[in-house]
Image (tube, grey):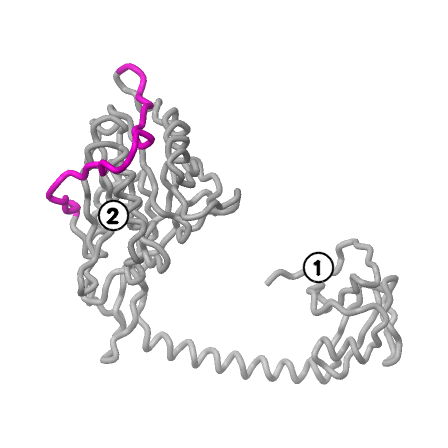
Amino acid sequence: ILYAHCTIPFAMSASAGVLVCNEEGVLLTKVRIGETKVKVLERVGVTTGILSDKEGFGLLNNDAVTSEGAPYVFKPSQEQKHQAGGDLAAELQALRLEVHGVRETLPSVLVGHVITPSQASRIPQVVASVFDSLGLSHNPRKTDSEYVLPQLCGDDWKLSWKWPKDYGDDRSLERTSYHPVAEYLKKLGFVCVDVSEGQCCVEKLLFNADIFTSREDNPMRVRGQRVYLRHRIQGRTDLAVLRRDNHGGYILRNMIKFVVEIKTVYGYQQSQTGCMREAQLQVIGLNAFNTHSSPPVVLSNLAKTHKVVYLDVDSEWRYEIKVQDCNSFAAAIHFADTLSNRKCISQHFSRPTTPDSSD
């Protein structure tokens, strides 16, 4: 709810109306010019009280509000203040009882860590606790065969861009690949946006999701209540492929088909495990309690390594992260696009826990 403060300067036409605030300057309502004090009080939701113009002059019941007198200030009568105080005390007591009841019936939550995918190599213990919390394997299961681009795909699917000559540590060159890869995806008909610096992302984060342990994983009790570990996964990727054009607006998780995480050849060789952990955390952040879509992550060094990391689920809603090796970047894009068209499966992934009926 947005409140307008009555001390701001303004000029109003008859169509604009005038503002009515309380004594603290919080906007109560907006009324038409010419309405009487009785009508204004009715719009405020009371039948009695003091209505004053900006100079402090009180209005009689049949006096009309004008643009010159705005903003108007409503003050409750002493009787109303006394009644409101009694009502507030009763409401606070009822709220205390309600909160006490909630504490007795709902599980406690122990807040864990705030984790970004870029920390995957530096804090392996914390990353491991995230996988444990979700009941996931630390090493995602690879599919049996390599995915090959279907023959029906034409030459447009071939990525002609290549890294510059090998200069050793080439990690500083990673950013040079974003634009040509984005243009390649756009030529294939995809809506692709560079989000590497948080462009078009709320608070520069493409995802900012809480994950919770399941009930079976943590049976600890505090004062008779179960304690559940919670982590927050937040971050972004390099490129995001959207289901529809965002027209420069914010990109939300429900708009994402799949994302692309690019590593240089040297960068991937230096930390293959770290790169995979980073992609896994991105999958978790993009899919956690996502009720609209289940985006996969394309992880590639744009040379010989092309993988699609994605969430999968069995008939009993047991989740796991899988990895599909692909023989080319185009094949990885095609596979990720195919996955993105499946029905959403992440609606129960890391959803907040609810108490057992036996508790």
Q: Which SS class for mark 1?
A: loop
What amino acid does circle 2 point to?
Tyr
Q: Report the number of discs.
A: 2
Rendered position, 249 above or below 180: below
The N terminus sits in image quarter: bottom right
Which badge, 1 or 2, comes first in the chain's sequence? 1
What amino acid does circle 1 point to?
His
Image-based side of 56 in relation to 185, left or right: right
Residue at 74 percent across and 81 percent down: it is 78
Q: Residues within 10 Å of mark 2 (few under 14, many from 20)?
A: many
Residue at 44 percent across and 50 percent down: it is 252
Residue at 76 percent across and 65 percent down: it is 19
Q: Which SS class for mark 2?
A: strand
Rendered position, 354 above or below 145: below
Residue 232 is covered by the magenta coloring? no
Rendered position, 74 above or below 302: below
- Between disc 1 and disc 2, the foreground one is 2
Residue 265 in picture, x, y percent from top left: 25, 25
Residue that badge 1 annotates: 5
Alpha-carbon span between mark 1 and mark 2: 49 Å
Residue 280 in picture, x, y percent from top left: 25, 45
Which label number is shown at residue 18?
Answer: none
Residue 87 in picture, x, y percent from top left: 59, 83
Residue 346 in picture, x, y percent from top left: 29, 58
Q: Which stretch appears magenta?
A: 138-167
Residue that badge 2 annotates: 310
Q: Residues within 10 Å of mark 1 (few under 14, many from 20)?
A: some
Most foreground residue, 359 or 193:
193
Could you tell me what secondary structure mostly forms the magenta stretch?
loop
